[in-house]
Image: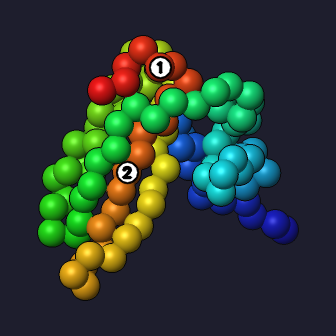
Amino acid sequence: MIFFKKNNTCCVCHKLFYSFQVKNFKQYPFCKKHYNIVSSKELFLIKSIRTNPQDPDTSVNAHEDQIKRYQSGEICFYMMEYEHSNEQLITIMNLYSTSNSNIK
């Protein structure tokens, strides 16, 4: 008997899916519905946030903001970049959206 586990989270809606239900776009997992949207639309960089392990509130607040935007109908997701600065790991959270109306 084969057991499947829902262990893939869509970057837009944050719902769990089986691995065969997600598709990767730029190495990030999306459910099929959101994959079809983000892969066929122009993406706009809405904002960029720099955070580090000593400042977890910044990334938590950014994640909560993305969820609020999604709940209001905006298709958006974060793509991460990483850099080292003075022996510290910096995470750059880039919020992308299919709409350019919310650029800050």
Please state, as top left, top right, bottom left or bottom right, where the N terminus lies in the image. Answer: bottom right
View extreme (front): residue: 86
Please state, as top left, top right, bottom left or bottom right, where the C terminus lies in the image. Answer: top left
View extreme (right): residue: 1
Q: Circle 2 is placed at which residue position? A: 93
Q: Position of residue 85 (x, y in %)?
A: 26, 76
Left/right of residue 21 with respect to residue 12 in the rendered view: right
Residue 63 visible here: no
The structure residue drawn at horizontal position 75% and vertical position 64%, both measured from the top left corner, is: 3
User: How many residues crowd mark 1 within 10 Å: few (<14), some (14–19), many (20+)?
Assistant: few
Q: Secondary structure at mark 1?
A: loop
The structure residue drawn at horizontal position 58% and vertical position 31%, both measured from the top left corner, is: 43
Q: Circle 1 is placed at which residue position? A: 100
Residue 45 visible here: yes
The structure residue drawn at horizontal position 30% and vertical position 67%, both measured from the top left corner, is: 90
Q: Amino acid at mark 1?
A: Asn
Residue 33 position (above or below residue 73): below
Along the line of sight, the residue nearer the viewer: 77 or 87: 87
Scheme of image coloration: rainbow
